[in-house]
Amino acid sequence: MSRIVAVSCSVSVLWMAACSGDDSSSGPEPTGGCPAEATTACLARQMACEPAGETTRCRACASGMRPSADGACVAIAGTPWRHAFADFTTMPGEEVFGQCQSWTLGNEEELLVATVELEQDALSHHSNWTFVAEDRFPGPDGVWPCAERGYDQVQGFLSGGVLYAQSTQATHEVQQFPAGAVLRIPPRSTIIGDVHLLNVGTEPVTGNVELTLYAVAPEQAGTRLGPLHLVLDGLQIPPRSHTRNFAQCDLANGRPARSFSLYYLLPHTHSLATRFFVQVVGGERDGEYLMDLDGYDGESHGRLYDPPVDLSGITGLRFGCEWDNPRTESIRYGLGDQEMCELLAFVDSIAVEGHVPSVEEIEADGETRVLTGECESIVVPWEG
């Protein structure tokens, strides 16, 4: 999720869900009926929960469906705009990046998007998606080198807006907003996504990505959301260590405390991560963990906040990650076997881009080495 513009709730949720087991096979759709704790654990991985004898199990919802708050699978509301992108084949050990894929919508009127659904079997490690005017990065749809048209995700955001970011390795993910909250996609727009495929297996794999936008009518849209993105792009993980990198990002910038609410959050790390967290700074919620996730499992972890979390009065956010590094060399921010620690959220009233270009080691927390740095953040008003 490197370089997209982007926060979360007071309940700590485990990535490694507490259900007795998973069953993603075909069969009757889950209908809920689980205890609250089991339901919460499944929802943390965008799965429904169903009783299984004396215990429970998490089940993936089918295409066009999402888990509801009570743990059942329900149909995604809205008018679908669906597109299947080109097939890719990745060879064993191959990593593909630097390519983009585009979809010109041909929409004569603005689309008010309440939900984005991604399905993929192409070993997509991660992907970021923006919307831009259809003539901004001219050329035919399909797959093309990003640099050839001067595209990167910052340019995509500045030229239009942020649409969606995929959880690491997720094969089916739904970015859902509470009722009335939408992303506004102007008329005659194009969707652009980067290609980042990673095959760690022993056989070639061929597959593709399908993206579906679910649009609602103007009378169903009240709040236009903006992105909030924070990234520790200067992270350092020393060899043979348990390490925490964190930073505190100022959202007030010397002005009165901000008033905004959180609607959706996506965390992003790689396989060595043991923790991801976000805390409130300032206001009545000062010190509260908005999200505190343990482990890494390659599941969908984009999270809906319904009702939205009121963050009025806060002055900033503290975020970070922890890793176990068994290697003999340091790890830094990057692709492949390197690591990342960042988040994309959708909020109202503002848009934020924050970067931490470097970190320095401070006093250890027990056996955990701790590094922190200054966050350089830009905050602008947002009306969608």
Image (cartoon, helix red, strand yellow):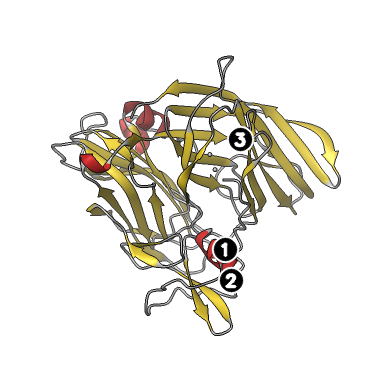
Residue 257 relative to residue 366: left or right: left
Q: Residues within 10 Å of mark 2 (few under 14, many from 20)?
A: some
Amino acid marked by disc 1:
Ala
Q: Please state the horizontal and vertical placement of residue 283, each as a whole percent of the image.
A: 63, 29
Q: Which residue is mark 1?
A: 41
Amino acid marked by disc 2:
Cys
Q: Residue at x 16, y 40 (%)?
A: 107
When asked about the image quadrant of residue 100, the answer is top left
Q: Residue at x 66, y 40 (%)?
A: 288
Q: Outermost residue, left direction?
A: 108
Question: Which is nearer the eye, 281 or 35?
Answer: 35
Q: Please state the horizontal and vertical placement of residue 161, each as a whole percent of the image.
A: 35, 33
Between discs 2 and 3, the one toward the N terminus? 2
**Alpha carbon of mark 2 to alpha carbon of mark 3: how far?**
32 Å
Can residue 121 be seen? yes
When asked about the image quadrant of residue 131, the answer is top left
Query: Can you tell which mark lies on residue 232?
Result: 3
Discs 1, 2 touching: Cβ within 8 Å: yes
Query: Can you tell which mark lies on residue 19?
Result: 2
Q: Secondary structure at mark 2?
A: loop
Vertical relation: 230 (above or below) 199:
above
Q: Residues within 10 Å of mark 3 (few under 14, many from 20)?
A: many
